[in-house]
Amino acid sequence: MTRQSKDPNGTLMMSRRGILLGGATLFAGSIAATLCPTLSLAAVDAGTQGQFMKLSNLLIQHQLSPAVGARIVDTASGEYKNLPQMLDAIIAIAEKKNAAQVEDFFGDIPDGELKDFAHWVISAWYSGCSSEKRNATVFTYEEALTFKTTSDILTIPSYGISGPNLWTRPNLPLSAPMPRF
Amino acid sequence: MVTKNSADVVIVGTGVVGVVIAEQLLDAGHSVLMIEAGPRVTRAEVVENWRNAPLGVKGDTSVAYPSRPWAPHPMGGEKPEDAYLQFTGPDAYDQTFIRYAGGSTWHWAGTSWRLTPEDMRLNSLYGVGRDWAFDYDTLEPYYVRTEHKLGICGPSDRSQQWPQTGDRSAPYPMPALPFSPGEVKFTEVVKTLGYNNIPVSQARNSGMPYDGRPACCANNNCVPVCPVAAKYDAETALHRLEKKGATLLVDSVVYKVETNAQNKIEAVHFYDQHKESHRITGKLFVLACNGLENPKLLLMSQDDRNPNGVANSSDQVGRNMMDHPARTFTVTTKEPFWSGIGPVVNSGIMETSQGAFRSEHAGAYFRYNNFARNRFVTFAALKKGLVGKALDDEIRRMAACTADIVAAHEILPDPNNRLTLSDKKDWLGLPKPSINYDVGDYVRKCWEVYSQPIGKQIAEAMGAIDIKISPKYNNSKHIMGGTIMGKDASNSVVDVDCRAHDHENLFIPGGGAMAAGACGNSTITMTALALKAGDAIVEQMRGA
Amino acid sequence: MKTVKSFALAAPLALVALAPAAAQEFSKELIEKGRYLATASDCVACHTNHDGGKPMAGGLAMASPVGTIMSTNITPSKQFGIGNYSEAQFADAVRKGVRGDGANLYPAMPYVSYSNMTDEDINALYAYFMQGVEPVDEKAPETKLPFPMNIRVSMMGWNLLFRPNEVHKDDPIQSDEWNRGKYLAEGAAHCSTCHTPRGVFMQEQKSLNLTGGQVGAWYAPDITNDKVHGIGSWSKEDLVTYLKTGKLENRAQAAGSMAEAISYSFQHLTDADLNAIATYVRSVPSANAGQASGVTRFDKGSAGNDMATFRGKNYADGLKGDHAGGQIFAANCASCHGYNAQGTKDGYYPSLFHNAATAGDNSINVISAILNGVDRHTEADHVFMPPFGDQVNAVVQLNNVEVASLSNYLLAQYGNNKLTVTPEDVQVIREGGPKSNIVQLARIGMGAGVAAVLLLVVGFVWYRARRKARPAHAA
């Protein structure tokens, strides 16, 4: 995938790509629809955004919200000066291995800048933030992937879980299946 | 007649103590003017402030309540020299509270343990601390009224209620809330050790709407804010008070209590957010700020008649500062517990707070924290460098198999634990409070010989594969003692109705009056004292 | 002014000397039958002040487009209630809207529907009200309306034109169940009172039976068997479930006066009667049938949120600009209804998409649910959504601009995206629904010498008063 920063249809291309890459998330359609104006205003060019979602989908085998991705790449472009090259480089490593999942290629990413960046991308999706610190940039709260790993039993705090006093449930063993997300 | 600068009764503070008294007075036909240092905000804003905060600081309640320049309150992440509270002594009295309309019940857990009859007679029974100026039976009807006023749910089974020794004259208005899987398992585990983990009685609508507020739907967010107002907080009363005729001034920082020639209170003075001063007169005054702000204001108000500060002929204002010093055991278990379904604090072991040992050392209350664990474990899992399925599994395991057990201790009133006015000034130029604090040997001995061993025993019974203990005593935000109650005006600040010994038309109800705080959270007792004071004020106003 | 005097028949009930009803002992069975019919007729909903009043003692204030009507004491108190009514007088009050003293009732009392009741059932109701209800010797507050609405006799002409005078007769072509259903639905349960639109004279437009009408701050929707606008997509079991519980999971939930109808009436009816009502209602066609195509009002919208546009930023900024509606939704609604408006897994808090509340043919119920909340008691639970208006227990007091912004977000994202709401629309609902200017028109009209005609019109406004300000539906 080449970048399309000068393509007048870049925004449109991105939003379509976003939907495709985001996979058939339960809510993708409506999110993508509201996303378009945001993307067109974003500081990051559409090609970089596309590459970012592609990398994210290689690093994380879950449904990812393009709207949240746009927020992450916006911050990434400020923090990583050679962001486009890093995206291309890691994607190339994955493609070389014909990677279907992160486990297939993650070990091949060289330690240092590239691996640190790959971890940062994963951390951003899972925590919804740019860092653990007080001054972190927040991309999402509700769609941070950490909550998806426990969505079968725990609520996302501040959101209700059930009708009044109807939340009694058995203790789930660790062998219980991971929610699909 | 209430105006913008005068009323029958002037109440400083809009927290739970202020609003329950205000409502009693309004219902009795008196005009009420309430003065709040901080802003008035909507629940919507507070909820979104918290959601907008980074995951790594979601445990800090202050992120939802940024303080205003004119009404500073403790904010996380501040440098000590910039902080509002200044500390001396071996332990830091670094409480969290907020100066907002509605006060700090905005972010309380809702936990409502009554004191026991024994808690109120520490000196008689164990030769330590102070006795309360009255007994449990005197306080009991006010506890009942508090439980109905705030909507406190609790178990109907007598064996599951607290206290076990004192009588209850009425049932809770709502049943206890259901336990999370972790709480069920914790209860079973400690049972094998002989401990009874009982449902917390808590100011939260259980299974039904109450007082026009909806039922709890387990948002697991009582701290720092209930997003649906199923938990009582004083903000929920403000609009009702206004409809009943109360005037509410916000962003108005009271800095002086003015006395007259009879040494009665004549007025209070406040700065608005533009640093302009205003004077409010009334027949009777209630200081319903918290246990730090009340003594600060009294000390700031010193005049020729009251050289140590208003209400301070005893020199007890600002002394005897108490809390529930707490140590946390973060336990990693082999098998899942799953915290985080239901309210954030929903059960506890209270019986360990009582016993003959109190002549030697403090008692302790053990609670299982029921916060969903994602916010605590996500970065730790990420730092392990895992990716893919291994990362998902590790986050889930850590969320399921970690738990915080907190041991909260009772502290004795010690005159050296003292709030004074620091030479550092806040934005308005008012002195910041400085607190000298030492949890004391009574607490430390408990930790060494009693609470730490029990905590470890519980952790091991839970199947701990790792136990981390907080290195120092954490504060519980239960601010007590600074305007202590007693019958003897020479060693206490207020009488049995929270009336200042020195000024017949000044009431200082709330946590500051508590002569002993035992181990349970203080708000229910503060509110009971407020209702008792309210009765006395209504009676006194009748003759006014 | 002459006109007024000559019409001043509306003497207070208590002053009217009537022949006392003959002391009569009714059987327990008859009284119980009457109790059931009173429940089916939902008498208690209006004739009891639910804020601490005694059953059937009246005193409930009911807002209407022309003023506040107070419900009356219908306990058997001889001084303040209907204890002196003969059975014939009672029958005339229920079926004809004529009081014991001969004065006309305002049609806030649904006697147009009750007119189909059989003599046998009137007898049972009478037995119940005389001997199954505790007499309450308390005077209910009087209704005081502005001139000329205080002229009760104006209803006489209207009654001549629009009040049916025949009791129900079975249609031999239909099943017994259908006939029983029709008897209840068109009579005691008085569905059409709210669900049928009103004509020029505020009469029920029978040709548009059950196709929907505004009731105070709420809209009683189309409940014909039209598949798109009505409830033709519901099974008979769905409708029975709804009437029993006040909700149909993720599709519809009763609020306003429908919540009261569920709380006080429908949930207590027998399964046989609920099935009968469902059988009949499901047979009522829409006058607009044939136009029905497209997505039903239970299948619109989809999950989603707008949060990526404001999360992590300043709340006050989020309230400005294009995404204010999404921000208000997140801050006030999502805590129970879910951040994608998906509801809770157990369905207790409904999803806001695929839900009649947001997908109706107008936006009235979206606005009203926000402003007034939901309060419904059933055997299973007490469903309560807090209000977001100016009430003392409003969780947040949203202003008209905020409610409009939120409504538009809800409609666009989750419901009928063809609708928009303005702050002015919100103000109308905040005030309890559209006001009538008929009082003013009548006064002017009388001055102009066309009093007779306009007075007739005036009377019909009463129908609007029907269910007071608490009304509501989301079926």
Image: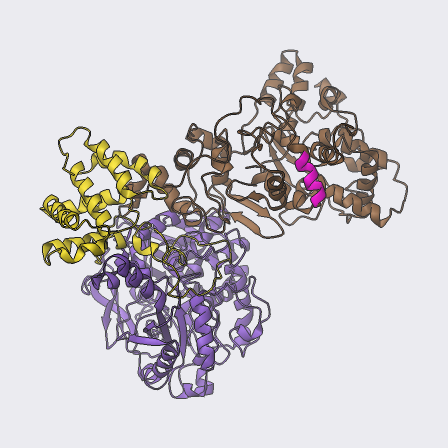
The one nearer the camera, C116 or B326, is C116
Quadrant assignment for the N terminus of chain C: top right
Relative to A139, say whether C20 is above or below: above
Compared to A116, does B119 lie above or below?
below
Does residue C309 appear anywhere in the picture? yes
Q: Is residue C136 left or right of residue C200?
A: right
- Whether B506 is among the magenta residues is no
Q: Is residue B143 left or right of residue B336?
A: right
- Percent from the top left, x then y, of residue B52? 29, 50
Chain B as rendered: colour: purple
Can residue B119 be seen here? The reply is no
Q: Is residue B339 left or right of residue B389?
A: right
Judged by its main secondary structure, the magenta piece is helix
Magenta stretch? C271-279
Left or right: where B373 falls relative to C161: left
At 42% from the left and 57% from the top, the residue drawn is B11
* Rendering coords of residue C327 (x, y %): 35, 42
State the residue at coordinates (35%, 61%): B257
Chain C, colour shown: brown
